[in-house]
Image: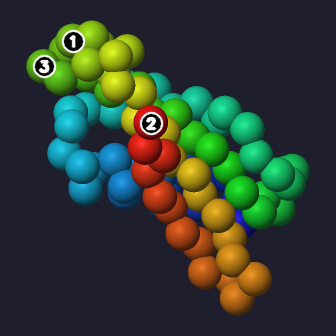
Amino acid sequence: MTGVKAISKAMAVFKKAKLGDIRTIDLMDGSGNGDNWEQINIRIGYSVNGDYTESDKNPFEVTVTERENGEIVATRIER
């Protein structure tokens, strides 16, 4: 999968959670390179009414994985 596809999937998981507005997206780590990633962990920084406090206390992290059948799955990492 491409990095763009992984970010899109992670953003969809965040939007479904309805926590606030996306402010930053950080690629944390993963396996693969270029446009050929198998798995990527993504952290989404967000704000609630312009305040980052909640995002700092409760980071929103998503792991995005491409399965062998080509399906791309994004799941929130619970801490």
Q: Residue at x 35, y 25 (%)?
A: 58
Q: Residue furthest front?
A: 79
Mark 1 neighbour class, 10 Å CA radius: few under 14, some 14 to 19, many 20 or more: few
Q: Are marks 3 and 1 in contact (CB under 8 Å)?
A: yes
As drawn, 58 above or below 53: below
In primary-sequence order, the first of circles 3 and 2 is 3
Say which residue appears at 27% left-offset and 11% top-offset: 53
Q: Which residue is mark 1?
A: 51
Q: Secondary structure at mark 2?
A: loop
Q: Indicate the position of residue 1 as horizontal and vertical percent values.
A: 71, 66
Residue 29 or residue 5, whichever sits in front: 29
Is label 3 in contact with label 2 (beta carbons under 8 Å)? no
Q: Mark 2 highlights which residue?
A: 79
Q: Quadrant of residue 42?
A: top right
Helix, strand or loop for disc 1? loop
Residue on which the image places disc 3: 49
Q: Secondary structure at mark 3?
A: loop
- Residue at image coords 68%, 50%: 40
Residue 35 can be seen in this image: no
Q: Residue furthest bottom?
A: 69
